[in-house]
Image: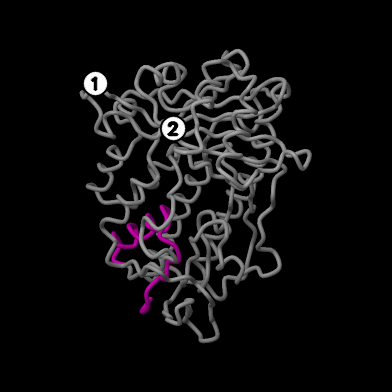
Amino acid sequence: MDKPVLIIGAGVVGLALAHGLTKHGISFQIYERDDHIDARPHGWAITLHWALPFLQELLDEETIQGIDGVQVDPSVGRNDTGNFVFLNLETLEPKFHIPPNYRRRVNREKLRKLLLRDVAAHVRWGKRLDAIDTSRDGVVRATFSDGTSAEGCLLVGVEGSGSRTRKFLLPDAYQNYQLPARLLGASITLPAAEAQPLLRIDPLLFQGCHPSTGNYLWISLLDSPEINGTLGTGREAYKFQVIQSWLAKTPADEVPASDADRVAVMQRRAAEFHPTLRNVVQKLTPDDAEVAEILLQDWPCQQWDNRGGRVSLAGDAAHAMTMYRGEAANHGLLDARNLCSALVKVSSGEASLKEALDSYEAEMVERTNPAALLSREACLDAHDFHCLNENSAVLRRRAIKQ
């Protein structure tokens, strides 16, 4: 491995991989299409559960300790039981308790910035991948839209569900599958008194479905007084993520373009929710709520020609999933750990790059193809209240085979 590993994408998974390579002295460079880390929204929050030990394998001790500081509420994390409740949105009664996991609910932006800290010198910003060339033995060449290029021993596409690397590897089969559901999400900051009814349901997150309309709701904490600096001020505030989704059966179910119309859709679909939940959605306003549409798409992992072990994928680029099982980031972090382990074998002479990549990809396909399909099933389950049972995909325990 006399040339660096080229990591395409400076998201959570790409940065975690970079930490692992640093730990083992393997040369790499990261190429990110954005001009800087705050160029576009980072997303909201993610739950790290079964992947936590794998992430910790990649990190140095200081960064591991830093994870506690990027939790949405460290005080909850210190005593969290892993409870996860699915509600009847009409009555507010729990319909199911999802089997608990050890978990950390973290702010995605803060986690990404934590992971960037020690590898920032290796990131090249404003580098949008334009082409990949594998015509020379043992070398992969990446060309970027600004006309620059880079050479490495391996290129790993970790640039999300719209991956250009995936398109290079599978030009006839790279497109995501669009599920028949639509999703809108916004954030809202509430004073402590108004936040308490939500925190009593669960201090981190909960979800549910309305039995008559099939409308789905997810509410999760984004930050707390301990994090946002309001603790002890008498003006304690909590920020929440509010997501609604529904099955798209007619043109009227499509998502409108403006924030005002999107807020109106969310409020209309919340009209029959229990007052505790309906009141939260009614507090959203177009002036302070940027309402994002998240496309409910997936791409179950499949085999590709890795060009002699020179081009591969990880994270959403390799296996895009919907959010309804909360496993996408966890699978991506396990990818990073497994790929790092594979490259350590190459570096030590234990395996060739081709052998290591073939093994890495075979395990990933076996693990994540069914996981993506299970998340697809969970999306459909989540909007069908009366068909839910303990074996429904949206309710099954989040776990990985050891």
- Up-down: is 116 above or below 220? below
CA distance for labels 1 and 2: 19 Å
State the image coordinates of residue 197 (x, y, percent, origin top left): 44, 16
**Seen in the image, is 29 located left or right of residue 307?**
left
Q: Quadrant of residue 172?
A: bottom right
Residue under the point 35% across and 70% down: 124
Is 397 colored magenta in this rendering? no
Residue under the point 40% across and 19% down: 194
- Up-down: is 149 above or below 23? below
User: In this orientation, which residue lies closer to the viewer: 78 or 60?
Assistant: 78
State the image coordinates of residue 260 (x, y, percent, origin top left): 57, 39
Residue under the point 24% across and 21% down: 234
The kind of residue tagged 1 is Gly
Q: Quadrant of the N terminus?
A: bottom left
The kind of residue tagged 2 is Ile
Q: Are marks 1 and 2 in contact (CB under 8 Å)?
A: no
In the picture of the structure, the residue carrying the numbered disc 2 is: 188
Which comes before the other along the chain, label 1 or label 2? Answer: 2
- How is the model colour-coded? one colour
Q: Secondary structure at mark 1?
A: loop
Name the disc covering residue 234, or none: 1
Q: Which residues are magenta?
A: 1-25
Q: Quadrant of residue 296?
A: top right
